[in-house]
Image: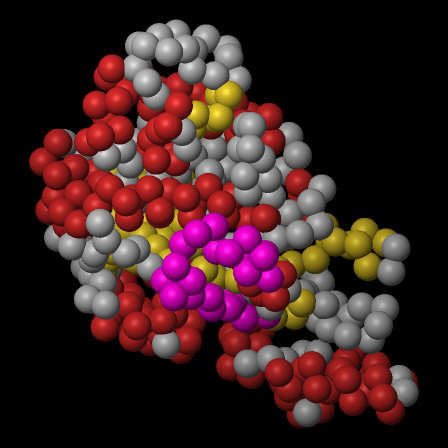
Amino acid sequence: MKTLLKKLHQDHVCDILNKISVEDKRLLLSQINMFDKKSLIKQKKDFFSSVSFLNDVFPWPKCGVFNEHDRKIGENVLKKGQIALVMLAGGQGTRLGFLKPKGCFPVSLIKNKSLFQLFFEKIIAAKKKYHVKIPIAIMVSPLNEKEIFSFFQKNNFFSLDSNDVFFFKQNMLPLLDEKGRWVISAENKVATGPDGNGDLFYHLYKSGIWKIFNEKKIKYLSVFSVDNPLLNPMEESLLGYHKSNKNDVTIRVIEKEKNMGLLAEKDGMPQIIEYLYFEDKKNIEKDFLFANANHFIIDMSFAEMMQKKSKELFYHPVKKIRRFQKEKKEIYKSEKFLFDSFIFADKTGVLLYPKKECFSPLKNKEDICFVKKDLFERDKQILSDLGIKKSIGQKKIELSQDFYFPTQELIEKCKKNSCPLEGYIQETDLV
């Protein structure tokens, strides 16, 4: 073990091992043994690497636009049961002042439905409309795995068949200080954090979920983050565009916003550059037009290929402020980014959507009121699109997710409805 620690430039851990009790030493060594050794070596190498992600990249010039034909193709993909969802839910709600997994955060305007519940009810609505099962795999972290599973069990998986819900985990890696040394907590343990989503395909494959999806004849994965309740992960137009253009990967984007990953061009291919690389280079950022909405459609064949290649992806050092021993410290969390894998795709498409239709992420306390407002405005627009012309104004409303995947019967009810609508609205409220 000491040989490994010296190889990793973690000599200070050897000093700690010489000073602590036998029991603490046993616990620390046991923790270190649980780390993937190849990942530790790569973490060290990447931390001291001088790779610049802004070299030889240019703003992505133009995005695709979907049409009605794409939407119909996407509907057919759903009807045939060819899509599975992959939700990224490893994060905690710390910045929201919420000491639970972020997906458990109550966000809807009237019913206070959690992020998890909103997405699960969307799946149920799509299942009802297209008469098909839509499986979902949820990527959790070792920090929140038990709590998330318990949350779903307590809520009976929000009426979704639990046999269609799968869980898999990220890895954990040591947090590093500015010199690349492991941060040691007051309990004489290595402080750790989840290693990002870049190994997603590897974990899907290793967990056996990829095999299950393959047996179900799934052709496409819709990958998205739990913190964006405005998103429809089964967007028919995006699915159809992906299939009709025979893409390996299709990226959903919006017009550029501050503090977001931006869409770049490198060697003629689209590439997402995370915002951390633009923080000190505002003069470069201003020329970029499109931002990553963190929603991707991915071919199963590409996912299979990437489960072997994902280990090659770079560990980005992401600076964080954490409290250790009652003192705030600047540390680095090593993360792989899923979108870095897209450089291995033969064909990547980019599709532009209005922000108001698909992007309102919940990152911190300041976002809560904006997200609720965006959900309210989207619900109003859905009602209008369905033919309900009565003015809602600023009346407080929240739609059942059935309105996002309306059956023909619901569409007819909307057209005929003559009653004012307010509060929580379900199909049975239409007369």
Q: Is residue 345 left or right of residue 4?
A: left
Q: Decide if residue 339 is on the left or right side of residue 318.
A: left
- The foreground one among 388 and 175 is 388
Total marks placed: 0
Q: What are the residue bounds of the magenta stretch?
A: 150-172
Give me the residue at 22% from left, 49% from top: 131
Q: In this view, does 143 lie above or below 355?
A: below
Quarter of the image for residue 126 reads top left
Whether residue 66 is visible to the viewer of this picture, yes or no, is yes
Q: Where is residue 412 in the image (x, y as percent from the top left)?
A: 21, 23
Asked which colour scheme the image uses, the reply is secondary structure
In this picture, is 351 found above or below 92?
A: above
Q: Position of residue 9 (x, y in %)?
A: 67, 79
User: 51 above or below 9?
Assistant: above
Identified at 28% across, 40% down, the residue is 235
- x, y percentage for residue 380? 39, 19
Residue 156 belongs to the span the image colors magenta: yes
